[in-house]
Image (tube, grey):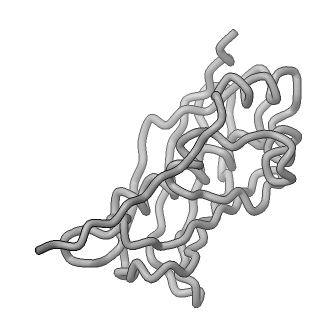
Amino acid sequence: METLREYSFTWSDPRDLARAMAGKPHLEWMQSIIEGQAPPPPLASAFGFVFETAEPGRVTFSVPTHEWTANPAGVVHGGFTSTLLDTVLTLAVQTRLPQDRMATTVDLHVHMVRALLPDGRRMTAEASAVHVGANLATAEGRVLSPDGKLIAHGTGTFAIIGTAQ
C-alpha cells in the first residue's frame, strides 16, 4: 500500500500585494516583501519561494527541495526549477523598470545540467538583467544546489508593458 503525504500552504489575497505595490518603485515593493511588510504573490507561497535579495538589475530567491517537487525519477522536477528561474529572471528585469511598467515573459530557455535530490535543503536562483529597452528586455540566471553546484542556467526575453490599472 502506498504512503500518502500532504502538502498545504496559505496565501494572501493578491489584491493585498497589488495595494502594497501601488505607487511604489519596484525595488521598494520587493524590499517590503523581503522584510515581511507585504505578502508574497500566491505562487511564491504555493511553491515555497523565499525572496532573498533585490537590487537594481539583480534578484535572488531560495526554495526548499521538498519531495513533493520530485518527478517520477525521484529528482526535483525540471518544471519546478524552470518556474523558479522564470520568476527571478522576470523580477531582475522588473527592478530596472519605472513603476508604471511591468515585464512579462515572451521567451524562456532553460538548460538543465545536473539533477537535484528533493532532500529539503534550499536551492538558490539568481538572475541579472542584461538589457532593458523600451519594449523588450533580456536577463540571464542560474539555479544552484545547496552546495553551490550549477543545476540549471537560462535566459529570458520579456515584453515591457504598462501596469494593469
Q: 26 or 3: nearer the eye?
A: 3
Residue sitting farthest toward the bottom: 147
Q: Is residue 83 above or below residue 137?
A: below
Residue drawn at point x = 54 percent, y = 32 percent: 104
In x, y percent, where is residue 88?
A: 61, 53
Q: 64 or 77: nearer the eye?
A: 64
Q: 22 or 55: nearer the eye?
A: 22
Q: Is residue 141 above or below residue 43?
A: below
Q: Is there any visible trace of residue 138 in the rendered image?
A: no
Residue drawn at point x = 75 percent, y = 62 percent: 52
In x, y percent, where is residue 13?
A: 64, 28
Q: Quadrant of the C terminus?
A: top right
Q: Quadrant of residue 20?
A: top right
Label tally: 0
Q: Is residue 91 left or right of residue 108?
A: right
In x, y percent, where is residue 103?
A: 61, 33
Q: Quadrant of residue 69?
A: bottom left
Q: Quadrant of the N terminus?
A: bottom left
Q: Is residue 71 left or right of residue 83?
A: left
Residue drawn at point x = 57 percent, y = 84 percent: 146
Q: Is residue 57 above or below residue 3?
A: above
